[in-house]
């Protein structure tokens, strides 16, 4: 989520300098939208208002972001590609579980949530999570993303698995990712601090994947 970072954070300047003109325009649209959403709420801001504030046309906004929700979750397409890439060479069920957990662990270090949790602006993560939790449209878009993750996992699972096993296994792996990704939002809803969320993410992921491996080991083959 580019939009889950603090666009004014100086640490983002080197990143902006390496972008192409198209990528900079996309980032400007996303950052502009996030400032409007933060000020007024997601549902109260229109695409036309975002376009005007970003000094682009409405068509330019929709060319970059097919859905308004994608202005908030602008890393989702990359996430789907990354999980597929991570699983590209798996040859067994155990390797598939390892690959999906590696994907989760990498995003703990460099994903949008990690950047928001590390932002210098106080309350950056709580503000972003509150925006999502406060909009039914954003919450639904978040949860729907894991259908795409499931499909990417299913496409990469070993061909030795029966079709029924592929369907069940892909769902289980995608739901493990879903659980790990939603947990920081759930913690904000419970009033947890940024420090406790940041400290607890890895432990939650390890528990989730340990339980997944145990469940798969017990399943009939």
Image: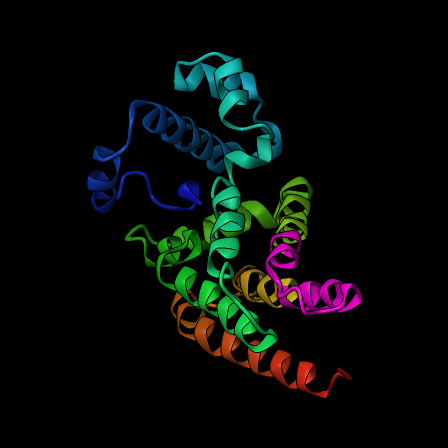
Work out whether residue 41 can be spotted: no
- Confirm whether the magenta stretch covers residue 153: yes
Q: How many marks?
A: 0
Which of 179/49 is in front? 179
Answer with left or right where residue 12 lies relative to residue 212. left
Image point (38%, 69%), residue name? 195
Query: In the orientation shown, which residue stands out farthest toward the front?
Result: 160
Q: Quadrant of residue 164?
A: bottom right
- Confirm whether the magenta stretch covers residue 217: no
Which of 63/42 is in front? 63
Can you say whether 52 is above or below 85 in the image? above
Image point (53%, 14%), residue name? 59
Image point (54%, 45%), residue name? 131
Residue 58, percent from left and from top: 52, 14
Which of 219/137 is in front? 219
Which of 188/155 is in front? 155
Residue 209, percent from left and from top: 56, 77
Task: Tell me the magenta residue range.
Answer: 150-173
Residue 89, percent from left and from top: 49, 63
Can you say whether 146 is above or below 53 in the image? below
Answer with left or right where residue 14 lies relative to residue 109. left
């Amino acid at each position: 989520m580019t939009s889950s970072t603090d666009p004014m954070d100086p640490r983002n300047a080197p990143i902006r300098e390496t972008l192409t003109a198209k990528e900079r325009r996309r980032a400007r649209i996303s950052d502009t939208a996030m400032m409007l959403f933060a000020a007024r709420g997601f549902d109260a801001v229109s695409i036309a208002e975002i376009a005007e504030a970003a000094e682009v046309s409405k068509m330019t906004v929709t060319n970059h972001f097919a859905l308004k929700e994608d202005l908030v979750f602008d890393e989702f397409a990359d996430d789907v590609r990354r999980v597929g890439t991570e699983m590209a060479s798996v040859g067994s069920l155990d390797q598939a579980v390892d690959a999906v957990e590696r994907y989760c662990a990498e995003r703990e270090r460099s994903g949008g949530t990690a950047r928001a949790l590390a932002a210098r602006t106080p309350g950056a993560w709580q503000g972003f999570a509150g925006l999502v939790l406060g909009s039914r449209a954003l919450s639904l878009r978040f949860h729907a993303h894991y259908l795409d993750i499931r499909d990417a996992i299913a496409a990469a699972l070993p061909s030795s698995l029966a079709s029924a096993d592929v369907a069940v296994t892909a769902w289980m792996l995608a739901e493990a990712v879903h659980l790990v990704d939603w947990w920081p939002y759930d913690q904000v809803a419970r009033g947890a601090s940024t420090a406790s969320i940041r400290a607890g993410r890895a432990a939650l992921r390890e528990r989730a994947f340990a339980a997944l491996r145990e469940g798969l080991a017990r399943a009939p083959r």
